[in-house]
């Protein structure tokens, strides 16, 4: 297992620009200084996890650090009361992966039919982000790895221990359906659907 100093030495500079670009492309309304603070907090969280022994020896550090950073970003926005809307990031041209919010488009359409108020739509997106950030179990790791860290199914299998890509894809679909139902229930409870 690498030491914290080795991890920082190797990854801190290498992931800085990709991390900043990912957060800027995914979350509107965060200032550069805030993103820098979140990046620092990400490496502090990695340090804490190493100290606790909660990181596997064969961890894919790039994916792990990016996933921790996205979780840190969601936590930061929630703690600061920032209703920062997540935007669709245009990935590489060869990356045909859907953004999870675009997969939620049918729910957005239902909300749009019930209100013309952009603040209500912002509230809906905040609800979606909050539920995405509060997932548990396999879904907590799998969905952010796929949608946020943009890991391939092969990387997800390796990182999260799935037997093959078909198993990982099947679990992603189950998790996404759970997410969609949780969002639908919350929006109904809020009177947005």
Image (tube, helix red, strand yellow):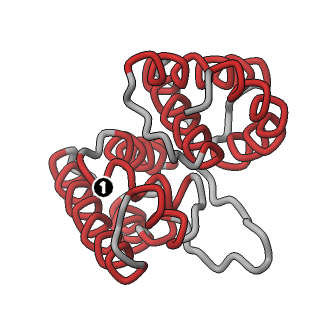
| Left or right: 173 as drawn, with respect to 86 | left
Query: Depth check: 45 or 4 in front?
Result: 4
Give the answer, above or below, for where 88 lies relative to 15. Answer: below
Give the answer, above or below, for where 177 lies relative to 4. Answer: below
Return the x and y of residue 29 as percentages of the image width and height: 68, 33
Q: Residue at x 75, y 80 (%)?
A: 94
Give the answer, above or below, for where 88 lies relative to 118. Answer: below
Return the x and y of residue 137 as percentages of the image width and height: 23, 48
Count of numbered circles in the view? 1
- Quarter in which the N terminus is drawn: top right
| The image quarter in which residue 34 lies | top right
Give the answer, above or below, for where 108 lies relative to 46. Answer: below
Return the x and y of residue 181 as percentages of the image width and height: 20, 63
Query: Depth check: 188 or 92 in front?
Result: 92
Considering every residue shown, the one lying at the far front of the view is 1
Residue receiving disc 1? 139
Q: Residue at x 43, y 41 (%)?
A: 126
Few, some or many C-alpha atoms within 10 Å of disc 1 (few <14, some 14-19, many ≥20)?
A: many
Return the x and y of residue 53 as percentages of the image width and height: 39, 24
Q: Residue at x 58, y 34 (%)?
A: 69
Q: Residue at x 55, y 31 (%)?
A: 73
Asked which secondary structure carries label 1, the reply is helix
| Left or right: 58 as drawn, with respect to 124 | right
- Quarter in which the C terminus is drawn: bottom left
| Left or right: 189 as drawn, with respect to 153 | left
Query: Depth check: 32 or 48 in front?
Result: 48
| The image quarter in which residue 130 lies | top left
């Amino acid at each position: 297992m690498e030491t914290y100093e080795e991890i920082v030495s190797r990854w801190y500079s290498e992931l800085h620009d990709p991390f900043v670009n990912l957060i800027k492309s995914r979350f509107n309304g965060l200032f550069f200084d805030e993103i820098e603070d979140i990046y620092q907090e990400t490496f502090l969280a990695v340090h804490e996890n190493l100290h606790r022994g909660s990181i596997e020896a064969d961890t894919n550090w790039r994916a792990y650090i990016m996933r921790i950073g996205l979780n840190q970003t969601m936590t930061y926005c929630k703690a600061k009361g920032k209703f920062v809307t997540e935007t669709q990031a245009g990935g590489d041209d060869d990356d045909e992966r859907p953004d999870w919010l675009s997969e939620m488009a049918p729910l957005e359409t239902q909300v749009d039919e019930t209100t013309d108020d952009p603040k209500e739509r912002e509230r809906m997106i905040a609800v979606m982000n909050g539920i995405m950030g509060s997932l548990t179990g396999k879904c907590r790791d799998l969905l952010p790895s796929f949608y946020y860290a943009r890991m391939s199914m092969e990387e997800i299998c390796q990182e999260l221990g799935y037997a093959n890509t078909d198993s990982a894809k099947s679990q992603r679909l189950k998790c996404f359906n759970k997410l969609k139902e949780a969002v639908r229930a919350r929006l109904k409870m809020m009177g947005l659907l």
